[in-house]
Amino acid sequence: MDNSGCRRRRQRVVLFPIPFQGHINPMLQLANILHSNGFSITILHTNFNSSYTSNYPHFTFRPILDNDPKVNNLSKLGSRGAGDILSGVVLLNQYGEESLRQELDQMLMASKQEQEPIVCLITDALWYFTQSVADTLKLPRIVLRTSSLLCFLVFASVPFLDDQGYFKQVNSLFDEEIIDSDLKNIILASDENNFKKAGSSKSVKDLEERVLEIPVLKVKDISKMKIKGQTDPSAKILANMVTQTKASSGIIWNSFKELEEPELEKIHKEFPIPSFLIGPFHKYFPASFSSLLKPDRSFMTWLDEQAPNSVLYISFGSASQMEKQDFMEVAHGLANSKQKFLWVMREGFVKGSEWIEELPDGFLDLVGERGRIVKWAPQQEVLAHRATGAFWTHSGWNSTLESICEGVPMICSPFWGDQPLNARFVSDVLKVGVYLENGWERGEIADTVRSVMVEEEREDIRERAMCLKEKVNVSLMKGGSSYESLGSLVGYISSL
Ligand code: UDX
């Protein structure tokens, strides 16, 4: 959609993504959407993870936080695992305020002389430090939330759920020692007094039980988020995110109304600020140019030769990492399923390994016969390919939406954070996927892969997935919910 038949004066919007793949993609897509609706775009970015900038000649990029010696710890972030994301978010929130204020101040002064006033700042919800900066500069801040509404509601309920005893005996990502100890101390030192100590006296819940207050979920979904309760360092990040989102001038969601209608009602009640559901963002433009890794396309000729719906696409996202023994179960399960596959395996995906050296003997012969392994793929293109029959995913929100948009059924194997919530939503609410919820076991993997790939067995899932794809298309057409919401967003930003 292009609403740029604009009679209005050109206005500039400043956007600030979190520098990790699952957050960069939707922010850059949003920037493109706003640009095509007549706004000029400035992207603030750290030099950490900024390789995509040359793909956007129509945007102005301004580096930020790069000269601050306190942020040197960023150089310790390397493998793009969960620890990197958490540490990066904390570090930049901790030290970013002064740099952002100076940068924005300069930009605002310059914009007064130009014909393009800066009308608002749009930041990732996890950039909670930006709200106070925006407030002091009297610049409206709109939040982009890159995951689902359901996930945001659950994150906002962590203290309540903790009081109800849902986090008893849960392991935290922090217990897995994936986070550098200096960074851990910084996180633990921050806001120490603002958080209650965990103190639930409630008994341990049965993991298979439904969560009374959020019946979509089972207790084990909450435990799989790997947050230990309200005193967990990740919970501190989430609490700050929720508070500062409430203080913002509005929320943009990469979702659409028909997908999360009950959740939208709750959001309206609990967050009485304007909400805009304009997603799925990636449908507005044919390809994503914000990849941090170079997509391998060498398998495309092979994929073109495969029968419709015959290939299982496997990718566990940009940040998950797997234990060696689980990796062996995946490889054996896949081999035993006898199905064709395209498997994205990032370097460093298997803990303690460079790449695929841990594969069982004989697996590479199998790859020649009926599969391909790549380090990174053009995912949206693969999902749209007629040969792709199902997507075995870690249930990151971008991957989930990309699969929904192409009507591709999912097998869900979440790792942490919002992923277990997305997996439950896909399998139990949307019913367009199967949740491998008992962990990594080769027999169950082989059976599940076979049942989802062999059409007669799971025809129901495939039909529902196609139906949902149709709903997405309708929401983006003139008169559809996302189309209308985008119109409202454009009007809202113009009026600021
Ligand atoms: C992280 C969290 O894991 C996720 O739960 C949260 O919703 C966002 O941040 P990530 O692991 O990056 O996300 O997963 P996801 O949200 O699915 O995003 C991955 C992106 O990388 C997708 O846009 C996907 O198309 C892209 N991708 C993935 C590729 O382009 N090529 C690949 O080979 C794999």
Image: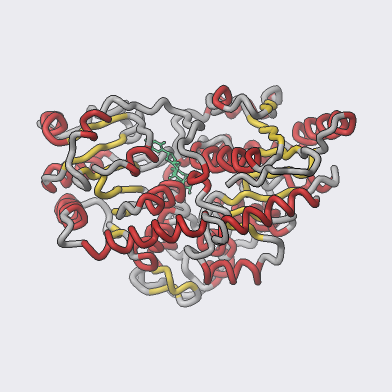
Residue 335 location, quadrant: top left
Q: In x, y percent, where is residue 290?
A: 51, 32
Left-right relation of 158 to 470: right
Instruction: Describe the colour scheme in one phrase.
Output: secondary structure
Q: In x, y percent, where is residue 135?
A: 82, 48
Q: Residue furthest bottom?
A: 212
Is residue 336 among what the camera can see? yes
Q: Residue at x 14, y 36 (%)?
A: 370
Between 177 and 429, the one lying in front of the other is: 429
Q: Residue at x 26, y 38 (%)?
A: 324
Left-right relation of 85 to 465: right
Left-right relation of 476 to 401: right
Q: In x, y percent, where is residue 351?
A: 33, 35
Between 420 and 117, the one lying in front of the other is: 117
Between 300 and 64, the one lying in front of the other is: 300
Is residue 329 among what the camera can see? no
